[in-house]
Image (cartoon, rainbow, N blue to C red):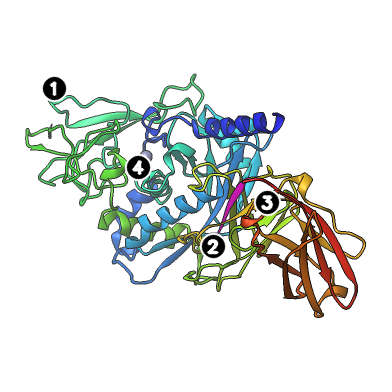
Amino acid sequence: MRSLFTLVLGLFAFSLFAQEPSKYDLAPCGTPPGIDPWLKEYYAHPQNYVTARSIDTLYVALQLHLLAKDNGSGRFSPERVLAAFCQLNADYAPSGIRFFFKNDWDLIDNTLWYQHTTIPQGIDMMLTNNVDSALNAYFAASVAGNCGYNLKYAGVAIAHSCAASGDHTWAHEVGHALSLPHPFIGWEGKNYNSANPTPTQVTYDYTYFHDTIDTQIPAPLDTALVEYLDGSNCDIAADLICDTKPDYLSNRWPCDGQSNSLSKEYDPAGASFYSDGTLYMSYSYDECQTRFSDEEISAMRANLVSVKSAWLADSPAEQDITGMPALLMPADGENTPTTGITLTWSSVPHATHYLLQYTRISSFTVKEFELVTTDTSFTITSNLLPNKNYYWRVRPFNHWYACTNFAPQQSFFTTPATATTEPDDDGWRCYPTLLRPGQALTLELSPKWLNQNSRCSVYDAMGRQVWQAGIEATSRQKLSLPSGAWPAGAYTLVYYAETGVKTRVFILAGK
Ligand SMILES: [Zn+2]
């Protein structure tokens, strides 16, 4: 019963990990409001920047930091990392900006940082762990109560619950890191109310969300002009970006079928409009968001080329992956011992890493084990439960490409520990010793028994031969016995070879 209790506890523990706060319970973004001085300069002297869209892809180095508790638990899973990374690159594909992992993922075990509640804790986390010449991105369970935030001198932080496939928080925070403000800048922390006259300007402070600055110092204020619908002040109002239309909505909001806000807004002149929910830099729901505007893209590219060129690589070091690994060993459905099983798969062109998972749940909704490896095999050294089907699968990726799929899963069946014999002095092994009707026997032979003329017979308890076959003496093979028609009881396998004779007794269970 102890193992059963462990099983229930194991599944329960997994469900606990899944209980991270809903993204709808988090503030969308904790990035301090403000117009990046670089963006002002960019718009003040556009002739100094190449603003035209280039066909050249910009390759941007990312350093990923994955936080866990002190005991190593709770970390964003490799599968979710790959999905989020694929989503990030999909979101930026129209911009010609592509991200790659500069190094392997940085695994940090620190409970305080893992669930930090204030921006200063996040600053400490980033300044302690940042690497040079890369956009540093931190994934943690809690990032100061937000889905994400960007610190322009340090990096971006993303909450686990806001980084599923289809979520755009990572794209949004990277947008901030590449100089973009919110289209509704100035309205952060305010509630637009169409019943009140819309002001011509709004004042905002850098300390609204979090006390990043000593509270003894008066809050630094700035003013943003409110953008008119007709575009007449678009180059000096709000985000300074003219192809993002007016938007005054600073709480997370749903959209209609055209990705427009449901509530109507009025500009200071009384012209009515709906906010554009397609923009990643807005606070619309993730399902509304599909794009950066052309001007936003030009600004991000100019920002990268002019002041963040240290993040850029000339060309991809690795190619996209189109192949799929073949799962080689154990064979699908094969019987295995409960420990010491080596899972082996084929290598895939351009893949440098593989994500391996196994579980007893064929849908993989609960994973019992995940591993990232650069090898094409892995030996399970822990004890699996006996008499269980285990399902396993492998997904290839590299530092530049993760939009891959898992190879079709396979399974193996663990035979009871008591029914698995240790290899004898000759390295000869036969299992299980307790056989279900129709179940195959597995033979393992050491080199001195290989490549000989060999045959096998099975005798029942009365000494009557019930089966015989000539076999090939390979290192590992399965004997499919017609045992479904045999009565339950003890049987003897006799193996004849030039090297000698081996006998093994096994018990056939009842149906
Ligand atoms: Zn933001």
Query: At x 24% / y 47%, what residue is drawn?
Result: 278
Q: Which sits earlier in the primary sequence, circle 3 or circle 1?
A: 1
State the CA–CA distance, disc 3 to disc 2: 50 Å
Residue 400, how many percent across, how many down? 51, 64
Q: What stretch is highlighted in magenta?
A: 388-395
Residue 423 percent coordinates (x, y): 85, 58
Front: mark 2 or 1 = 2
Secondary structure of the residue carrying tag 4 is loop
Q: Name the residue under label 4.
A: 35
How packed mark 1 is, by other alpha carbons closer than 10 Å (few <14, some 14-19, many 20 or more), is: few
Q: Distance between the residues labelled 2 and 4?
A: 37 Å
The secondary structure type at the circle numbered 1 is loop
Q: Nearer the viewer, mark 1 or mark 4?
A: 1
Q: Which of marks 4 and 3 is nearer the N terminus?
A: 4
With respect to residue 226, does 133 lie above or below?
below
Q: Position of residue 368 (x, y in %)?
A: 60, 43
Q: Mark 3 points at which residue?
A: 487
Q: Is residue 267 magenta?
A: no
Q: Which amino acid does label 1 sit on?
A: Asn
Q: Do the residues labelled 3 and 1 touch (CB within 8 Å)?
A: no
Q: Which of marks 2 and 4 is nearer the N terminus?
A: 4
Instruction: Name the residue carrying label 1.
Output: 196
Dot placed on the residue nearer the N-terminal end, 2 or 1:
1
For the residues bearing labels 3 and 2, Cβ distance under 8 angstroms: no
Q: Which numbered dot is residue 208?
A: none
Vertical placement of residue 415 versus 112, above or below: below
Q: Circle 2 — which element?
A: strand
